Structure formats: C-alpha cells, structure tokens
Image (cartoon, helix red, strand yellow):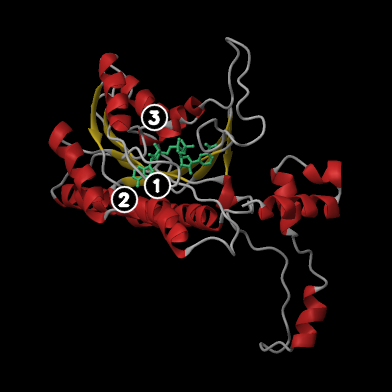
Amino acid sequence: MGELTGRTVLVTGAGRGIGRTEALHLAAAGANVVVNDPGVEIDGSGGDRGVAEAVVAEIRARGGRAVADTGSVADWADARRMVELAVAEFGELHAVVNNATIEVNKGLERLSEAEFDNVVAVKLKGTFAVSHWAAAHWRARFDAGDRTDRAIVNTASGSGLLNPLPTQTNYAAANAGVAAMTTVHALELRRLGVRVNCVSPSMVRTRLTTPVPGMDQAPPDGAPDPKDPAVVAPLVAYLVSDGCPLTGQVLSVRGGTIAVNHGWSRGAQLTSESPVWTVPELAAGLATLALEDPFDRLATALGGALGAHGREEFEAMVNAELERH
Ligand SMILES: NC(=O)c1ccc[n+]([C@@H]2O[C@H](COP(=O)([O-])OP(=O)(O)OC[C@H]3O[C@@H](n4cnc5c(N)ncnc54)[C@H](O)[C@@H]3O)[C@@H](O)[C@H]2O)c1
C-alpha cells in the first residue's frame, strides 16, 4: 500500500516533462492516475496520442493503474470529459494537477492575437476549465453527504510571479493569473472540503528550458540532479494526499529548495491632504519613493547579472536579445 492508495488524480500535460514525472510518482505511491496530454508541440500545434499512452504503458508496466486522455484543457467539453473519465474508470476523482502549458515567446510588438490567446487558453483558461468541472463534481458529492478530502494543485512559473522575463507577455500574464486563481479558489472551495495550492517549478530540465544556457548539463553519473523534472513530484504528491492541511499556498520548487511566495505586497506610500492629487505634487512625491527598476529585477532573477556587466550594458544585452525574437 502506498500513501496515495485509493486516491484518483487527474494530471494535465502529463505526457512529458514535469507532468510525466508527477504521474509516474503518484502512480508509484498507489494513486489511480488519469494521464491527460494531447501530445502537442511546444507552441500547441500538432498532436500525438502516443505521448499520453506511453506514460500509461510505463505506469502499468510497473504495476500501477492509469488511463490516458488526449483532450485539450483549453476545450470546455474536453475538460469536462477528463473529469468524467476519472470517475467512470476509477469510481471517483480526488485531485486535479493542472500542469499543462504551451509557450510562444515573442516581443510584444511581434506577438500576434492568436499567439496571445493560445497560450492563455492552455495555461489560464485550461486551469479554470478543469478546476470548474472538478469543482462541479465535488459540489454534487458534497451535497450528497460525501466529506472526502479533495485537492487542486495548479502550476505557475517564476515568469509571472517573480521575474519580468522578456518575450513572455502571454505566459507571464497567464501564470500570474494562475497564482491569483489559486487563492480565490482556495477561499471558495474550502467550504466543500477542497484544498487548492500551486507549485512554481524553477530551472527544471524539460523541452521548454533546454535552450537556457547550462540547462542541458546533467551532473556526473549517480550525483543528485537538482534540474531533474522529478524534483517537483514529491511536493505535488504531498499536496494531493489526504490529511495535507495546506491550502491557498504558492510554493516555488528549485532543486531541493521549496519557498513560500507572498505575491504582490504593498510597498511605500504617499498620502495627499486633498484626495485629488495635482500632477506636480505627484511628480515630486513619487520621486521620493524607492521604485523598482524591472531590469534590476530581471538581473536578480538571472543570478546577479548586473554585477558582472553594469546596468547600461545589461539593458543593451537584453535589448539585443529581444531583437532576435
Ligand atoms: N521546466 C521548467 O523549468 C518550468 C519552470 C516554471 C514553470 N514550469 C511549468 O511546469 C509545467 C510543465 O512544464 P514542462 O517544462 O514540463 O513542459 P513540457 O512542454 O515538457 O510539458 C507540457 C505538456 O503539456 C502538454 N499540453 C500542451 N497543451 C495542452 C493542452 N491544451 N491540454 C493538455 N495538455 C497540453 C504538452 O503536450 C506537454 O506534454 C508548466 O505548467 C510550466 O509552465 C516549468
């Protein structure tokens, strides 16, 4: 018996990368797993049913229980079907792990309407759609007197929560939205016995991050690998487990380090005698406050890049990189 025996978990985008290792880990811990993944390219194009089916075959070969689903989380009817599949196949759904994403990285002036919409549809609307249908099912179970522990685990990114990463208008906005939705849903669903948390992986080696310098280097044989996608799965397993008390949390995972995120927080403030400011008063007043430079923030996120280059040189490097996208 594993610690998740008897729990049924739907993992979206579970055919590759972090979602795949989450599905394998949850199944090894005894959970029944719905492996959702349409097997699309990074930009959302194409599709390969074999991607989800291969993970299911891997789980079954190890004696676990899993079923494949190849619907898109961005499709309202598909999202409903994956929740129904869990119940039809395993008799119940206890947890949803919203992990699916696509990426289309371009500078704002080049990013098309469709490229914005498509990324937001998978990352943000997809999280809403699957959570909606799960919550509707859990509402009915709650009304029928069922008090089983339920959980949602969303997936955000430092891009959107912490770092103003250039070329990620769509992805950053969607991830910030996922974190915001996590706290709203945690509040709303507590009355139904549903806990809602969010993980935010960082520097994990998947097809999304292989272009990042240094990401393709694995440590020598046998040494622990802090960039292995498997570093995220134990936290997800804990968050979906019956008896985990956490709700409303957004937790970053980088190698073996887990950090609690506090989100936007109020900084220094000015108050005028009259509630209506004049523009000169605003200009003088705001000049006295410590304001954050987004380039400083990016440099910090990149590990103190400013120290090596200086502010102007760093901005020029970022601008040159932007011209390539
Ligand atoms: N890799 C990292 O370092 C990193 C950092 C921050 C956040 N994340 C987040 O972790 C999650 C997993 O990312 P990854 O790096 O494993 O990426 P990945 O590309 O390896 O896996 C994403 C999976 O989602 C699937 N997918 C795409 N569109 C879908 C849809 N409409 N419906 C269902 N599935 C769909 C893809 O087919 C793919 O298999 C994402 O939410 C991502 O934002 C990853």
Residue picked out by circle 2? 131
Q: What residue type is labelled 3?
A: Arg
| Dot 2 or dot 1, earlier in sequence | 1
Left or right for 220, reference 143: right
Quarter of the displayed picture in which ligand 1 can be seen? top left
The x, y position of residue 155, in whole percent, is 45, 44
Check the image and report above or below for 316 versus 212.
Answer: below
Which residue is drawn at the image coordinates 64% and 63% (left, top)? 266
Pointer 1 residue? 44
SS at mark 3? helix
Q: Is mark 3 within 8 Å of ligand 1?
A: yes
| Spatial CA span between label 2 and label 1 | 21 Å
* Vertical order, 203 against 81 (above or below): above
Identified at 24% across, 27% down, the residue is 66
Please name which of the two marks, 1 or 3, marks the residue nearer to the observer.
1
Q: Name the residue furthest top.
A: 222
Q: Residue at x 47, y 60 (%)?
A: 116
Q: Name the residue under label 3.
A: 20
Query: Tag 3 or tag 1, which sits nearer the N-term?
Result: 3
Residue 302 appears at what percent x and percent y? Answer: 71, 42
Q: Is mark 2 on a helix, strand or loop?
A: helix
Callout 1–callout 3 Cβ contact below 8 Å: no
Q: Residue at x 62, y 50 (%)?
A: 162
Q: Nearer the viewer, residue 172 or 240?
A: 172
Residue 181 in view? no
Q: How crowded is mark 2: few (under 14 residues within 10 Å), some or many (20 or more)?
A: many
- Rendered image: mark on residue 149: none
As helix, strand or loop, the secondary structure at mark 1 comes to: loop
Any atom of ligand 1 within 8 Å of the CB at mark 1?
yes
Q: Which of marks 3 and 2 is nearer the N terminus?
A: 3
